[in-house]
Image (cartoon, coloured by chain):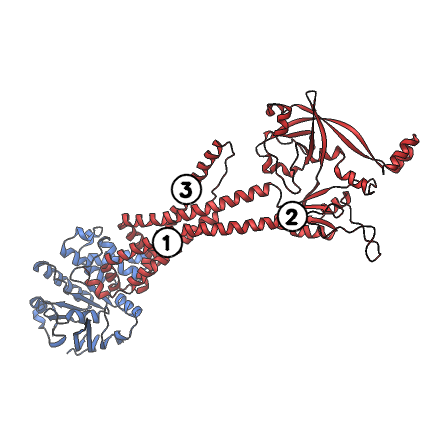
Chain colours: A blue, B red
């Protein structure tokens, strides 16, 4: 367990889904604490509840029971507008399928969170350029997602997640659609960003070797429960 | 999200599915066009009818007659004998419709003109032939009346010009080619009424003539002739009706007609009643007011002065009611097309939600509120409505113009003057665009709320 006060405190959280008459408990009375600056990897097999837990912590979903405290705020108690603000101001998200909007250029995709946050136009272009430079895509800003490779699209998605300068970066299988080399490059970039910006990263993956190499802590889920969690050796990150 | 960003995103989304959104917008445009075309027909026909009626001079006029006259419109009850009342008291004599009364009416507020109906029998001499007919004095204000719109030649060059306009049927009696009469001179032979003052009677040397003058109540009738130039021929009798100029065959400017002092039917009536006190009276006066809305007030004021007064304003009101109902039905039929178009908007936006489900999920994951998503869909629906409304008004106007054009061609083939049957006033254009915008927003209400309520996790999972 982390010794510093937790940034996120998941407290006996459950999430049920109803499929007809059947109730499926995707997350089952799970508790977890995450310290600021951690790079936590959520590992588990398919259906273990890791993506559901990530969505709950990212404010995309609400728990059926329990509480999730982020910076002392209980996400379960926030209304939809409060949750939207949390996602806009505190959270950055990266998805397995990149989710860049195909109608927009890379630059416009990265600008989208700034539009939603009503940031001034002149400030926007500066931040977009900075975010694209950080992921080394400055030269591709006018390209549409379909004109980019998978790795470039994921780096673009990463730039979009970073542009609002979030406290926590959530990544849901960020290497799932990439080959191993590109996936490794993305994780290297993630770690570089974490080292530079000092943000907290929570990543869902099923690739244990990558998790062991890049994360500072690993949490293993099975049947919606946290079955194990452990800190990685600092040397393992080299 | 700021309005400018919202507009930019909506415009981008509309551009990306250009064909489908254009077709939906075209649907709105057709709906609005049918509404505008229908209502423009209603407004056009109403304007045409009011214009014709206004030009007929019947709706901004009060027709006045003396209570001494025969009972007619506007008279109040049976005429009492001026001599004996049942209670034995002498009843006040009804006021004569004379020059004093005319001046009183002219002094009333909002009165533009007061003119008598001057109509007298005459013989017209032309080309050594005599044609009995009647002459009518027409006021200067009749220049704009529809009856004179199809004139061959021109209207009187001035209110005092010694000129005549002939009615075509009468002109045909004079010449088989009525148009050839324009510029020719005709001679009017008529009876002049001369009023003799008591001094004039006293100065009469012939004692028999003096006696005749006294016996005739101070009136004498003298035969006169007047040469006058024809300046125009009109096809139809320039309207009509109560106080109008119906029945006239030779038209003179009213001031010229008055100066002739021709004896009229009421002169004889005055004489029979023993009222021939030397002062001429009028059979009827027409009081023209500035605006039809002043008619009732002037009519009341004249009645209070002891005269019969009558206006056709009530008839105009009924006409307005008929046209309002007509417009309502036309509007309802037009709205049906717009209702179908609004279903098109709902369909397009619902389809867009299905297609853009993942996009909605992404927007929400990036921090868009429910309101942001809802407003985005609203903006798209509103933009389609606005653009559709603008195109629709233009299209509707074009349909109206085409109808007017077609009708004019048809009427001209029937030897009738063309008319403007469709009219799009600014308020109709503005209301149609606003209506299209509101209907489109209403159509976007359901899809927009549905999009806003989407669960982001489910939306992101959508392939």
Q: Residue at x 18, y 52 (%)?
A: A146
Direction from residue A119 to residue B78 in the image, left or right: right
State which quadrant residue A210 falls in. Answer: bottom left
Q: Residue at x 22, y 50 (%)?
A: A142
Residue A47 on image: x %, y % = 12, 70
Cα separation, mark 1 vs mark 3, equals 20 Å
For label 1, the SS is helix
Tag 2 residue: B311
State which quadrant residue B129 falls in. Answer: top right
Residue in front for this viewpoint, A108 or A225: A225
Chain under numbered label 3: B
The vertical placement of B106 against A33, above or below, is above
Which disc number belongs to residue B339?
A: 1
Instruction: For the N terminus of chain B, give its image quadrant.
Output: bottom left
The vertical placement of A188 against B304, above or below, is below
Q: Nearer the viewer, mark 2 or mark 1?
A: 2
Residue sticking out furthest to the top: B128
Direction from residue B304 to residue B356 in the image, left or right: left
Residue in front for this viewpoint, B452 or A161: B452
Chain under numbered label 2: B
Marks 2 & 1 on one chain: yes
Tag 3 residue: B399
Disc nearer the start of the sequence (1/3): 1
Q: Nearer the viewer, mark 3 or mark 2?
A: 2
């Amino acid at each position: 367990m982390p010794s510093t006060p937790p940034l996120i405190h998941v407290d006996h959280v459950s999430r049920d889904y109803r499929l007809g008459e059947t109730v499926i408990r995707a997350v089952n009375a799970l508790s977890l604490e995450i310290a600021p600056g951690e790079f936590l990897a959520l590992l588990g097999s398919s259906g273990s509840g890791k993506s559901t837990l990530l969505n709950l912590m990212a404010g995309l979903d609400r728990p059926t029971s329990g509480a999730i405290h982020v910076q002392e705020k209980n996400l379960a108690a926030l209304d939809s507008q409060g949750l939207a603000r949390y996602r806009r101001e505190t959270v950055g998200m990266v998805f397995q399928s990149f989710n860049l909007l195909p109608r927009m250029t890379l630059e416009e995709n990265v600008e989208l969170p700034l539009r939603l946050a009503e940031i001034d136009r002149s400030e926007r272009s500066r931040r977009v350029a900075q975010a694209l430079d950080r992921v080394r895509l400055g030269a591709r800003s006018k390209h549409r997602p379909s004109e980019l490779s998978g790795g470039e699209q994921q780096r673009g998605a990463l730039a979009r997640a970073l542009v609002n300068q979030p406290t926590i970066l959530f990544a849901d299988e960020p290497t799932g659609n990439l080959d191993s080399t590109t996936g490794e490059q993305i994780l290297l970039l993630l770690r570089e960003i974490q080292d530079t910006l000092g943000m907290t990263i929570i990543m869902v993956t099923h690739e244990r070797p990558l998790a062991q190499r890049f994360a500072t802590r690993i949490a293993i889920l099975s049947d919606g429960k946290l079955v194990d969690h452990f800190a990685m050796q600092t040397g393992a990150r080299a | 999200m700021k309005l400018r960003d919202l507009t930019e995103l909506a415009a981008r989304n509309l551009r990306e599915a250009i064909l489908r959104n254009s077709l939906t917008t075209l649907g709105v445009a057709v709906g609005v066009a049918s509404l505008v075309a229908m209502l423009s027909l209603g407004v056009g026909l109403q304007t045409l009818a009011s214009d014709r009626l206004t030009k007929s001079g019947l709706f901004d006029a009060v027709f006045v007659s003396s209570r001494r006259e025969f009972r007619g419109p506007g008279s109040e009850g049976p005429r009492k004998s001026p001599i004996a009342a049942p209670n034995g008291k002498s009843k006040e004599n009804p006021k004569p419709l004379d020059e004093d009364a005319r001046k009183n009416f002219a002094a009333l507020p909002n009165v533009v003109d007061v003119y008598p109906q001057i109509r007298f029998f005459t013989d017209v001499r032309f080309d050594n032939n005599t044609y009995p007919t009647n002459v009518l004095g027409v006021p200067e204000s009749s220049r704009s009346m529809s009856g004179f719109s199809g004139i061959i030649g021109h209207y009187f060059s001035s209110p005092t010009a010694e000129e005549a306009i002939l009615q075509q049927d009468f002109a045909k009696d004079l010449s088989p080619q009525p148009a050839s009469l324009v510029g020719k001179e005709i001679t009017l032979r008529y009876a002049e009424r001369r009023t003799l003052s008591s001094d004039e009677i006293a100065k009469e040397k012939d004692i028999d003539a003096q006696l005749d003058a006294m016996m005739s109540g101070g009136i004498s009738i003298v035969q006169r002739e007047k040469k006058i130039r024809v300046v125009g021929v009109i096809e139809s009798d320039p309207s009509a009706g109560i106080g109008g100029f119906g029945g006239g065959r030779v038209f003179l400017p009213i001031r010229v007609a008055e100066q002739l002092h021709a004896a009229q039917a009421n002169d004889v009536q005055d004489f029979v009643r023993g009222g021939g006190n030397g002062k001429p009276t009028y059979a009827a006066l027409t009081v023209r007011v500035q605006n039809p809305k002043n008619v009732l007030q002037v009519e009341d004021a004249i009645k209070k002065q002891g005269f019969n007064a009558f206006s056709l304003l009530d008839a105009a009101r009924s006409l307005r009611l008929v046209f309002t109902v007509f417009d309502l039905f036309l509007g309802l039929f037009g709205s049906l097309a717009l209702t179908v178009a609004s279903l098109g908007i709902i369909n397009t936006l619902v389809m867009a939600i299905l297609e853009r489900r993942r996009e909605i999920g992404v927007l929400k994951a990036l921090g868009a509120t429910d309101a942001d998503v809802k407003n985005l869909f609203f903006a798209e629906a509103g933009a389609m409505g606005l653009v559709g409304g603008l195109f629709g008004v233009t299209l509707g106007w074009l349909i109206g113009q085409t109808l007017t054009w077609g009708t004019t061609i048809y009427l001209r083939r029937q030897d009738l003057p063309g008319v403007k049957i469709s009219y799009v006033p600014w308020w109709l254009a503005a209301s149609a665009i606003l209506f299209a915008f509101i209907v489109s927003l209403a159509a976007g209400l359901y899809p927009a709320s549905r999009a806003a309520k989407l669960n982001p996790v489910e939306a992101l999972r959508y392939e």
